[in-house]
Every structure is written in C-alpha cells, then in structure tokens.
C-alpha cells in the first residue's frame, strides 16, 4: 500500500523539514554573504573562509541586517575579522573553566540547586565573541548512554530543583528526542523547573514548531526559556511570533545578552533592546561582561564603562527592564552580580 500520510502528519513533516532546511541553507562563506548584503568583501578586514570556527549564519538572522552597511551590529557578531588573530593578554582558551567537566559527563553542576545539561555541541550560528569558538566540541552528543547517566544523577540529587538545558544549542536536537527527554525529566519528583537556554528563537524562529510547543505545554514542570538577543534589530516579526507562541504555551521568557563593543555598548542600544524585548513578551535577565576567550578581545567593554552604561540606562528604563550586569568567575558559587 502506498504511504499516504494524514494532513497533520504532512504539516508536521513540512514544518520539521523547514527549520532543518533553513539550518542547512544558512550562509557558510563570506563572499556569498557579502553579495547578499551588497557589501564589497574585498574592502572588509575579513579572515578568508577557514575551517576552524568558520562563518555560519542562518538567512533569517541575515535578513535583520542592514544592506550595504559593513558596520552593522548584527553583521559584526558573525563576520570573521582579522582582529580575532591578535593575541591579547588575559584572553585564554577556556576562560570559565568549563570544558573538562562538560566533556566528561554531559552535565555541569556548579551552582546550588541547578544542574546544567549539555545536550549538543552544535549551534545554528557561530557568534564570534563566544567562548565556544575555541571548542567546536562536536563530540558532545546526547548519546543514550550519556542521557541515562545524567538522569540517574538528577534522580539521585534531591537538592536539584532546576535543570538547565544548554549546549551548544539544546533546541538543535529534534522534537522526538526533545519530547523524550522532557518526559523523563517530568518523572523526577524533586524537579520544579526546566530552563532552556537557546539562541534559536532569535536566530532561527522556525525552530519553534507546533511539536516543540506542544511538548513544552504538556510538561509537568514549569518551563523557563532564556533567549539570547544582543540588539533590538534581532527581534524581527518572526522572532516576535515565536516568542508569543512560547508564551502562549506556558513558558516564562527571559533574555540574556553579552555586552559587546560596537554592537550594543551604548545606552541608546541597550534601552532599545530592553524596550523591544518587553514589547515581544520577554523580560531582561542578564547582561554579561564578555568571557575573555582567545580571539574576542576586540569585543571587550571594560568594567568601568559597563557600570557607567548601567547607570545611564537605569535613569531611562523602568526597574524591571534593567538587566543585571554579571560576570562569570571560575570557581565562584554563583555568577557575580556587578550591578
Ligand atoms: C550560568 C549557569 C547556571 C545558571 O545560573 P543562574 O544565575 O541561575 O542563571 C547554572 N549552571 C551553570 C554551570 C552555569 O554556567
Ligand atoms: S553558544 Fe550561543 S553565543 Fe555561542 S556560538 Fe552558540 S549561539 Fe552563539
């Protein structure tokens, strides 16, 4: 008998394929990206297409960039430039000391009550400022063995009330795997919350599929989704729609950003970002000082400037739209809140 899928199945398949397809069709070379943006690649101080941490960006994110502007704050986040090759004192391979722990167990238990699960090493986008640039850790995969181990650990530790799904990008795993994991977490009585840290609602909003939404809605636990946007212009209509859907399906939405030189290091840019976040139903959570990963020094905003910016935005925004300025210190019992 020929395979004749029902209409809902067809819809599900096409939506599923659509984000996978968009992911596969993202830009991977500088020439074609520049052509798309009407920018002369020859005039930019780029690093030619290389193998380690290459250019990678989905079309949906590129569509938010301004054509013809080589200084676009979104373009800066993803364009490989020669400044990355300069050595800078204090900028090291693994600034937060995470890698050893991650690679071994797939679970990071640094802070009281919260355990972080590394679901995959993959991301939909390569952000130049990310500490992950030095660890394209594709060997970190959610193997059944790893998952069994992680679940056993979570079950045994009754002091853990929140599981954080992270990566890479945890929403890059498919709906079926994701649903299985959520169901398994649902079985752990002492867990109260499942928190998902993902950049996909922003850079690939098509990932927020009906299948994923229904899985979140049916979870027994409270769901928190922490998105990652650095600039108001990243928050397009499709991103707004994705956030609306997440919210309608019961998720609490927060945002974390990284303070980045010549991307969002002005009071104006930060105010616009936080206003726009609220407009789409998201509350600001953290504004991170840059983790000092090798190759990212040109993004650094020093602490004094950061504090000054915070003072400025505090005078202009309601208190609930001011994120906490934080820095991660290896070995500390929590992220350090500066103001
Ligand atoms: C950031 C982080 C958390 C969460 O910290 P919050 O301050 O609760 O957002 C948990 N575990 C690890 C390993 C982290 O890096
Ligand atoms: S982990 Fe987040 S910041 Fe780093 S490359 Fe992936 S999406 Fe970008």
Image (spheres, rainbow, N blue to C red):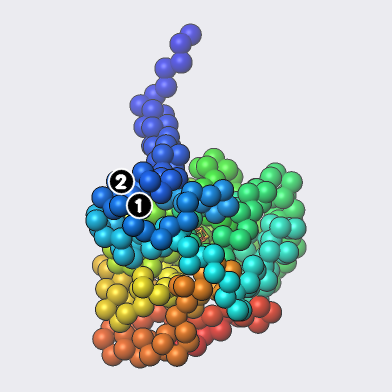
Residue 11, position as x, y percentages in the image: 36, 32
> The C terminus appears in which quarter of the rendering?
bottom left
Does the CB distance between marks 2 and 1 fall below 8 Å? Answer: yes
- Residue 41 marker: 1
Image location (x, y in percent) of residue 195? 52, 63
**Residue 52 placement (x, y as % from top left):** 58, 52
The percent coordinates of residue 189 (x first, y second) are 64, 61
Q: Is residue 277 visible?
A: no
Q: Residue furthest top?
A: 1
Q: Is residue 320 above or below residue 69?
A: below
Q: Quadrant of residue 324?
A: bottom left
Numbered mark located on residue 35 in the image: 2
Query: What's the distance in space between the residues labelled 2 and 1, CA to CA?
Result: 8 Å
Count of numbered badges drawn on the protein: 2
Image quadrant of residue 274? bottom left
Residue 10, disc: none
Q: Secondary structure at mark 2?
A: helix
> 187 and 96: which one is in front?
96
């Amino acid at each position: 008998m020929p395979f004749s899928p029902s209409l809902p199945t067809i819809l599900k398949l096409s939506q599923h394929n659509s984000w996978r397809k968009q992911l596969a069709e993202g830009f991977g070379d500088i020439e074609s990206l520049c052509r798309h943006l009407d920018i002369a690649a020859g005039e930019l101080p780029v690093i030619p297409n290389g193998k380690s941490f290459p250019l990678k960006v989905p079309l949906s994110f590129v569509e938010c960039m301004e054509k013809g502007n080589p200084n676009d704050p979104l373009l800066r986040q993803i364009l490989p430039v020669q400044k990355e090759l300069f050595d800078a004192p204090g900028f090291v391979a693994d600034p937060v000391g995470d890698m050893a722990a991650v690679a071994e167990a797939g679970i990071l238990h640094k802070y009281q009550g919260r355990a972080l699960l590394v679901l995959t090493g993959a991301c939909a986008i390569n952000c130049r400022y990310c500490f992950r640039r030095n660890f394209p850790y594709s060997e970190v995969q959610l193997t059944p063995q790893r998952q069994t181990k992680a679940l056993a650990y979570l079950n045994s530790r009754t002091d853990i009330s929140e599981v954080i799904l992270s990566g890479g990008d945890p929403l890059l795993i498919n709906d079926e795997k994701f649903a299985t994991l959520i169901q398994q977490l649902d079985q752990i009585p002492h867990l109260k919350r499942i928190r998902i840290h993902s950049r996909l609602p922003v850079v690939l909003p098509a990932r927020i599929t009906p299948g994923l939404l229904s899985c979140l809605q049916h979870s027994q636990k409270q769901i928190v989704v922490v998105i990652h946007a650095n600039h108001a212009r990243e928050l397009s209509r499709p991103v707004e729609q994705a956030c609306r859907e997440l919210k309608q399906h019961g998720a609490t939405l927060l945002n974390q950003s990284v303070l980045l030189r010549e991307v969002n290091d002005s009071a104006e840019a930060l105010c616009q970002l936080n206003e726009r976040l609220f407009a789409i139903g998201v509350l600001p959570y953290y504004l991170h000082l840059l983790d000092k990963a090798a190759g990212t020094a040109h993004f650094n905003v020093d602490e004094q400037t950061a504090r000054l910016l915070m003072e400025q935005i505090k005078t202009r925004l309601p208190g609930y739209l001011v994120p906490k300025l934080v820095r991660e210190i290896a070995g500390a019992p929590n992220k350090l809140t500066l103001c």
